[in-house]
Amino acid sequence: MKVGLGIIGLDNWYHALPLCPFPHEEIPDARMVAISDPVKSRVNAMQLPQKWGCQYYRDYNDLLKNPQIDAVIVDACTATHAEITIAAAEAGKHILVDKPFATSLDDADKMIKAAEKADVKLGTSYNFRYRAPYVRAKEIIDEGMIGKPCHGMFITTANLPEDWPGTGKPGWFADPSKAGGGGFADHAAHTTDVMRWLFKNDAKQVSAEMANLVYRDIGNEDYGVATIRLKNDAICIVESSWTNIPGSGFGETVSIHGEEGDLCVRSPYILVFGKTRPFRDRVCITYDEPFNYVLRETHTKLVKEFVSCIIEDKKPPISGEDGRASLEILLAAYKSAKSRRTINLAERTSKNV
């Protein structure tokens, strides 16, 4: 079986464009059938139909009518995720949704319910789980090398995003009505998922601060930091920003401290210290991960596994519930920053932690 894929939207081009030629070259069980975006010039500029030999649709509803498409990857702006996902589910298509999952928990619940009703797969594009250092970090934690994790710090720093390569403008990313969040949500969507994944736990309390520290005239914040208490009483700090100067690139640091050791992921390496061999003395594990390679490689692995779940009729390992769980933390952080108080989260938990 070859799974026919369609991409809906190029708004989040950082995720959409790294997918370019992979279905034919690297995922033999999938083929790219069509792409939909209301701005045809964006598709033409990247020669996407020519590269893939696929069809173009201005309206995603027309794409959903194509019987050759089994699944769609939703990379349109966040505010449209719910309507697209529900329409795709009703059309009988499996769905992989970009981050953040939605702009409200009500929409997230409707998306999950629509997929369940239509009996289609619903996954979330948290490609950080496929980063080699994070995969190794999880193995080290799961093997008990640092003992029970008790606190952590997740920091990401980035440039102000561009709404399209070379424009120099954030466009929809800085529009609250389209993005649902700014410099905090953009990458904290990933890191709150990595946090839940590494700690195998959901959040119960969130306290946060948001600000425009560099870009004071954009609609969304360029900086945010949240203190998150998990249900097992571990405490994590999540910080995410767009305040890097243009051209300086993307930076990240993840530190996890356990009862018997600690580890620090700062690409391209992991530093590990534990009580047992081989980490009794601090060990440095190095990975060769250029950023463009990371975008391409991790998205390929993500989509490859999603395709496998369709063929084998399995639930995606990063599900719609995982998308909702991360979104709940993000929304609580914004609510906390606005109200200046700690937010207690609902009791609903993900089954995929």
Image: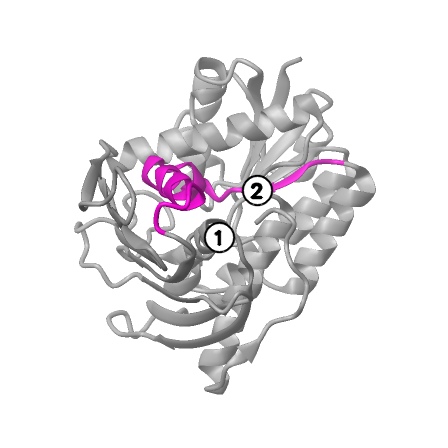
Q: CA distance from mark 2 to mark 1?
A: 9 Å
Say if 40 sits above or below 187 in the image.
Answer: above
Counting the numbered discs, the total is 2
The residue located at (45%, 25%) in the rendering is: 48
> Residue 293's spot in the image, x, y percent?
30, 31
Region of the chain picked out in magenta, as a range? 120-146
- Residue 159 horizontal side relative to residue 343, left or right: left
Name the kind of residue labelled 2 in the image: Ile
Task: Tell me if 218 is positioned left or right of 318 in this view.
Answer: left
Q: Quadrant of residue 6?
A: top right
Residue on which disc 2 sits: 318
Question: Callout 2: 10 Å neighbours few (<14), some, many (20+)?
Answer: many
Residue marked by disc 1: 193
**Residue 26 visible from this viewpoint:** yes
The colour scheme is: one colour
Seen in the picture, residue 70 relative to 276 is either above or below; the reply is above
Q: Is residue 121 magenta?
A: yes
Q: Quadrant of the N terminus?
A: top right
Q: Earlier in the sequence, mark 2 or mark 1?
A: 1
Q: Secondary structure at mark 1?
A: helix
Query: How far across and down, in percent of the image, does residue 59 sit?
Result: 63, 39
For this rendering, which residue is in front, 172 or 249? Answer: 249
User: Furthest residue to the right?
Assistant: 117
Q: Position of residue 147 (x, y in %)?
A: 39, 53
**Picture residue at 64% right of the left edge, 51% below the top:** 321
The crowding category of the residue bearing disc 1, from other C-alpha atoms within 10 Å (few below 14, some 14 to 19, many at least 20), is many
Q: Is residue 89 magenta?
A: no
Query: Whole-percent x and y of residue 102?
Result: 59, 56
SS category of the residue bearing label 2: loop
The kind of residue on which mark 1 rests is Asp
